[in-house]
Every structure is written in C-alpha cells, then in structure tokens.
Image (cartoon, helix red, strand yellow):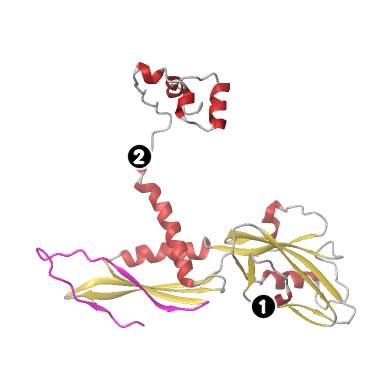
Amino acid sequence: MLDTLILTPGTPEAGTEILKPEIRVIESEDTYGKVAVEPLSRGFGLTIGNPLRRILLSSTNGSAITWVKIDDVVHEYAAVPGVKEEVMELLLNIKRIRIRSQSERAGKMRLDVTGEGRVCAGDISTSSDFEIVNPELHIATLDSNDARLSIEFNVEQGVGYQVAAQNDGLSNPPVGVLPVDAVFNPVRKVNYNVERTRVGSITDYERLVMEVWTDGTIRAVEAIQQAAENLVNHFFLFSNVNRVDEEGAERAPVVVSPEIYQTPIEKLELSPRTLNCLKRSHVSKVGEVLEMSDDEL
C-alpha cells in the first residue's frame, strides 16, 4: 500500500486553513490505473469512492457487437459448412470481441475468410471508426481448403450489459439476423480503499486510493474522468433546485412601452423559418409575441 504522504501546511490564520485536495496518477497502463486523492475531510473518502465505483461498473460508455449476419445461416442452431464450431459457440466468441470506437455512431464490420486455418478477431475488416483491441481472440476454425466464413457485424455504443433480445428491439429479429449479448461496459473491476493520512499535526484526514481495470478499449484514468463527469451532471440538478419553477406556475407579465409593443416582428432579425411560423400564427407585433404562452411558443 502507498506510504503516507505528509503535507506541511502554510501559516494558517486563526489556527484554521482550508486545504484543497489534490489527485495524482500513481499508475496508468492500457488496462489498469491507480489514482489517489488527498487530503479529504473525514468521511469524504467513502462518500466519493462508493458512487464513483458504482458508476464505473454500470454507466461507462463503450462499444459492442449487437447482432451479426452469417452467410447461409438463418438461425443460431444451424451449422456452418466447413466450420468446426457451432453457431452458438461462434456467437459466444464474437461476444468477447472488444472494440474501441472513434465516433458515437453505429457502424458495420466484415469478416471474409477462406481455406483451412484458425480465424481470429484480427481477420475482421474494420473502418476507421473502429479498432479491435484483442485481435488475437479466437473466433472459429475452418477445417478444409474449401471452407468459407462470411460474417457481417453491427457495432453500437451503449452502457452496461444488454441481452440479445433487447438489442435494437430485436425481440423478433428478421431471418438471418442473429442478436448477440452486448457487453458495452469497458470497466472490468474497480477497487477503492480509504486510508488515514495527516497534514502537519492533524491526523484525521483521509486519502482515497482507486484502482480500475478495463478491457483496453479505454484507459482507466479516462474512465474515472467520465464517471466523475456523469456524477457531477447529476448532482448539478440539485444545485439548481431553487431555480426550478413550480409546475403550473404562471409566467409574470412583461410590461413594455407602446412603441416596443407595436414594433413589427420583421425588425427583430429573426430567421426566415421563425418569422414564417409567427406570421402563420397571425402574429405581427412584438407585443403579441410577449403575450404568447410557453406552449404557444
């Protein structure tokens, strides 16, 4: 475990000082990362570590294959001529392909191989949007020189885990479309530990140490940053709770001078689309716009 880091405080005023916690990256690899945050006030190690761990394991974005089309195969119980594995085994192997996506849009990949030999994930042809991070993964074995395997893969982005029947609403997929259980979450394991640390003579501060293991499609530090942003966005809702208008509350009337009220809407430099919408609603003056309700707008 990490050695205790002793921070020497400056010259506090009236015996008190507000310390700003700092984060540092201890280790950062393709599939593993370790960070530490300190000094934290008592109780904040658990308060921060637990929700971050939950979000990392449940709500981290990732890419996965959601369905495939295998030439000459209409359902998962069929057999592919010249392929040693059954279709169900092929789907299980395909499920383990890990993909790093360079964009948020869905896309396709293609596999076309012939001849006897071992087929791996690295044999799949991808666009510039996708990168397979485990190309050595075994997919199938062709057992003759005449054997051929042709597969189309559909790749999407998502969070968590999605069973095959839920992918794209494919509860009743078209003939030839084989849904695949999608493992979107790139985070494999998260561990956090809260330790005691000290600042000068004060010993009741805490240090939060987080360890994150990923599948290689995202670095651990990036996953932690994504989880923190997700958490901040949700907490931000509560920081604005006093600004939320009560449901059904009436909007206060806007008082303007007669000159502004009679101003034609053409002088507002609105876009042609907005201007035409107002004219179709028989609105021609600024004052009439101000009198419109939120629903009408």
Q: Residues within 10 Å of mark 2 (few under 14, many from 20)?
A: few
* Label 1: which secondary element: loop
- Name the foreground residue: 85 vs 102: 102
**Residue 22 point in image, percent of width and height:** 31, 69
Q: Are marks 2 and 1 in contact (CB under 8 Å)?
A: no
Camera-side mark, 2 or 1: 1
Secondary structure mostly seen in the magenta stretch: loop
Q: Is residue 228 visible?
A: yes
**Residue 196 point in image, percent of width and height:** 28, 75
To which quarter of the image does residue 211 belong? bottom left
> Is 21 part of what is drawn in magenta?
yes
Q: Which residue is mark 1?
A: 135
Q: Earlier in the sequence, mark 2 or mark 1?
A: 1
In the image, farthest residue toward the right: 146
**Residue 222 point in image, percent of width and height:** 47, 68
* Label 2: which secondary element: helix
Q: Which residue is mark 2?
A: 243
Instruction: Classify 245 as above or below 97.
Output: above
- Between the C-alphas of marks 2 and 1, the distance is 51 Å
Q: How many marks on residues?
A: 2
Residue drawn at point x = 35 percent, y = 62 percent: 47
* Magenta part of the chain: 1-30
- Name the foreground residue: 256 vs 77: 256
Image-based side of 250 in relation to 15, left or right:
right
> What kind of residue is marked 2?
Arg
Residue drawn at point x = 69 percent, y = 68 percent: 126
> What kind of residue is marked 1?
Pro
> Is 56 part of what is drawn in magenta?
no
**Residue 246 point in image, percent of width and height:** 39, 33
Instruction: Classify 5 as above or below 271.
Output: below
